[in-house]
Amino acid sequence: MNTENLSTLSRTDRDGIAIIEINNPPTNLVDRKLVVDLMALVDSLSKDEITRVVVFRSALTDFFVNHFDMAAQVNSTPASKPRNGLSPLAQLYIRISQLPQVTIGEIRGRVRGAGGEFALALDMRFASLERAVFGQPEVGSGLLPGAGGTQWLPALLGRARALEVILSSDDYDAAQAERYGWINRALPDSELSGFVDRLAKRIAGFPQSGIQNAKHMVNLATLPAESLMTDESQRFQILMVQPVVAKRVKWLLSQDAATDGGVELNLGAALGRLPVDDQMSRN
């Protein structure tokens, strides 16, 4: 058994399976630390000829992978013009979707925004019936999903349900996510890890050539076009510098501080309470 530790990720390898535990407290935000560690992990897996299955789990009770670190973004100096091409985050998620290994998300807790797009980039998603919560909250802040959400969700959910999920910016439980095709299965929490372990072991026991070629062909039929991902990335960056976005994000951050993290736990409900003033309406 081999082990490897990064600042936000720990890796344990056994019998062709790599277990990746995500630990970026307090809420597993997609921030610079996590992105850098995921990039290092992807670099390692891209050259790994032994690992056949990668399972992602969270070390935190209430969060699998959370949204993008908006506090850092709104408090930074905006770029003079949007970056050309794919954003680094979108590039990372494309690389994850194209890994030679089979990637599986074992989801407990919240998975929203950029964290939701991370989960969508994985090959399979299995979630706890009692503890998993899904959402794409970007539109509620004046944005749009910017790292693949507008492309992956319609392919999985269909046009109407993808629009419902994206435009409502609401939270969805695991049972609803399963009905919509967002995840493979919703399982009782007590059964989730055992099911994922058995599936990972079964797949890892098959010939690597078959696994990789099958995934490659399915990818050709299903992965979003890079041109559309680039368009989405650039639209996100344009919207990020709009005053209405900073105003809404700062209001949410103030409410989260006032409720000792309550907004992060119930983000869909909080977005529904955002004040709608004249400036917000005009933008």
Image: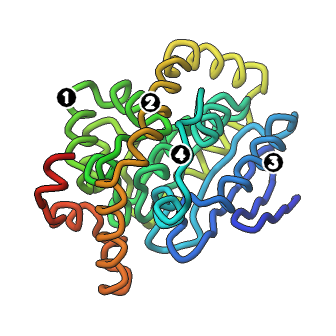
Q: Spatial distance from mark 2 to mark 4, Cα to Cα?
A: 15 Å
Q: Quadrant of residue 129?
A: bottom left
Total numbered labels: 4
Q: Nearer the viewer, mark 1 or mark 3?
A: 1
> Dots 4 and 1: beta carbons under 8 Å?
no
Point 57% across, 13% down: residue:
220
Q: Spatial distance from mark 1 to mark 3, Cα to Cα?
A: 42 Å
Earlier in the chain: of badge 4 and badge 1, it is 4
Q: Which mark is residue 160?
A: 1
**What residue is disc 2 on?**
232
**What residue is disc 3 on?**
15
Going by the numbered disc 4, the residue's amino acid type is Phe
Callout 3 environment at 10 Å: few (<14), some (14 to 19), or many (20+)? few
Earlier in the chain: of badge 2 and badge 1, it is 1
The kind of secondary structure element at disc 3 is loop
The kind of secondary structure element at disc 1 is helix
Q: In the visual, does 167 lie left or right of 243?
A: left
**What residue is disc 4 on?**
118
Quadrant where the N terminus is found in the figure: bottom right
